[in-house]
Image (spheres, rainbow, N blue to C red):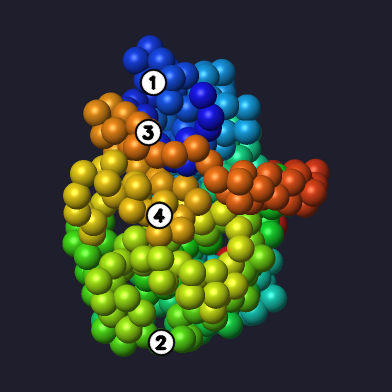
């Protein structure tokens, strides 16, 4: 059975027999884990090892671990990492210290995630902080200045790569001007600001990127970016210049409508390399996997390049020394 162009979630902290059998019959390109899947280091290593045993050889294991409020690995078993907003505050006082803290944070996140069996971390967020908009971005953003966001996002990504972990920049082509949370409803942005693209353009060589479930009326009045062939081809692949692995944001979010399988097919037909369905419900997951085609030749090459990039950038890191240095900067 070929590897399918899907990233999916699982229900709980262990790999149950039914899910394992489903993955053997309908092998996804990867699995993303959430708080419901994480208890402690021993449990998590056992889970990621069990997943490796049933997934295809080069399948990826992903986790959202930005620091701040978006973190699946938490105290008391893992370090509390500063939010992007806190790093931005340090940068405002001392730019050199801010960039160093961003790199160290990325490296520390990467070391901890790699030790648990993950090879992809969904960070950094490169959305701008825009006054008066939804706080779904909020302190997950490095700020309102595109150049600052680009520099700090780059530093986090390079820290992750130094730990041998593949970073995912998000959410293309920019979530900062959304007035509502796309987890709950479809944001509509009537006027685009090309400044929103600048952090992504500056980081277009990163290996992974995630789309936004937002309707950008100036670019496509009918379809949100995740489902828009025009936005993916002309804005994400075109204006931004991103050529790496493009994964949808969670297709279970309420910004989208329709059955999970139809959402997944629409995202892939629009130009995403991977359709991501995170809910972990067996029926929805099975429907998505049954609907998704095999990975395209282009997606296979992009995934290989992403893996090789992280391998090439990995260096020996001492987590205790890095944590002491990073904490001393604040």
Rounded to the nearest angstrom, the CA distance separating label 2 from label 3 is 36 Å
At mark 2, the secondary structure is loop
Point out the frontmost of discs 1 and 4: 4
Q: What numbered label is drawn on residue 22?
A: 1
Residue 104 shows up from this direction: no
Residue 64: image location, x then y, percent: 46, 48
Q: Earlier in the sequence, mark 2 or mark 3?
A: 2
Decide which of tag 1 and tag 2 comes sooner along the chain: 1
N-terminal of the pair, mark 2 or mark 4, is 2
Pointers 1 and 3 in contact (C-beta within 8 Å): yes
Label 3 secondary element: helix
Residue 151 location, quadrant: bottom right
Give the residue pinned by disc 4: 269
In percent of the image, x 60 and y 58: which residue is there? Answer: 244
Query: Which residue is label 3 attached to?
Result: 289
Decide which of 136, 95 is in the foreground and name it. 136
In depth, the one of 311 and 142 nearer the eye is 311
Q: Look at the picture and state if 280 lies above or below 160.
A: above
Q: Which residue is mark 2?
A: 193
The disc at residue 164 is: none
Secondary structure beneath disc 4? Answer: helix
User: Would you place residue 230 above or below residue 305 in this image?
Assistant: below
Residue shown at 57% from the left, 54% from the top: 245
**The one of 265 and 329 positioned closer to us in this rendering:** 265
Q: CA distance from mark 3 to mark 4?
A: 15 Å
The image shows residue 85 at horizontal and vertical percentages of 46, 69
User: Cα distance, mark 1 to mark 4?
Assistant: 24 Å
Which tag is nearer the camera, tag 2 or tag 4? 4
């Amino acid at each position: 059975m070929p590897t399918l162009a899907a990233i999916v979630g699982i229900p709980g902290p262990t790999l149950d027999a039914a899910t394992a059998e489903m993955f053997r019959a309908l092998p996804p390109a990867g699995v993303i884990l959430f708080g419901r899947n994480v208890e402690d280091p021993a449990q998590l290593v056992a889970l990621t090892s069990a997943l490796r045993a049933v997934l295809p050889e080069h399948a990826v294991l992903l986790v959202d671990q930005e620091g701040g409020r978006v973190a699946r690995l938490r105290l008391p078993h893992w370090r509390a990492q500063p939010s992007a907003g806190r790093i931005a505050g340090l940068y405002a006082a001392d730019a050199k210290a801010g960039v160093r803290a961003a790199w160290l944070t990325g490296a520390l996140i990467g070391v901890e995630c790699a030790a648990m069996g993950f090879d992809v971390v969904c960070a950094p967020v490169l959305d701008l902080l825009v006054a008066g908009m939804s706080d779904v971005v909020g302190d997950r953003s490095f700020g309102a200045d595109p150049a600052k966001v680009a520099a700090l996002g780059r530093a986090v990504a390079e820290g992750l790569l130094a730990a041998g972990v593949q970073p995912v920049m998000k959410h293309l082509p920019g979530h900062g001007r959304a007035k509502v949370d796309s987890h709950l409803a479809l944001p509509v942005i009537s006027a685009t600001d090309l400044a929103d693209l600048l952090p992504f353009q500056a980081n277009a060589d990163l290996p992974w990127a995630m789309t936004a479930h937002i309707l950008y009326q100036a670019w496509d009045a009918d379809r949100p970016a995740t489902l828009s062939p025009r936005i993916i081809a002309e804005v994400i692949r075109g204006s931004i210049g991103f050529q790496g692995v493009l994964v949808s944001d969670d297709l279970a979010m309420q910004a989208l409508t329709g059955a999970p399988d139809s959402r997944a097919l629409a995202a892939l037909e629009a130009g995403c390399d991977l359709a991501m369905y995170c809910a972990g419900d067996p029926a929805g997951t099975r429907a998505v996997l049954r609907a998704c085609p095999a990975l395209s030749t282009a997606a296979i090459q992009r995934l290989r390049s992403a893996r090789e990039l992280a391998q090439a950038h990995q260096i020996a890191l001492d987590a205790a020394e890095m944590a002491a240095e990073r904490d001393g900067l604040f």
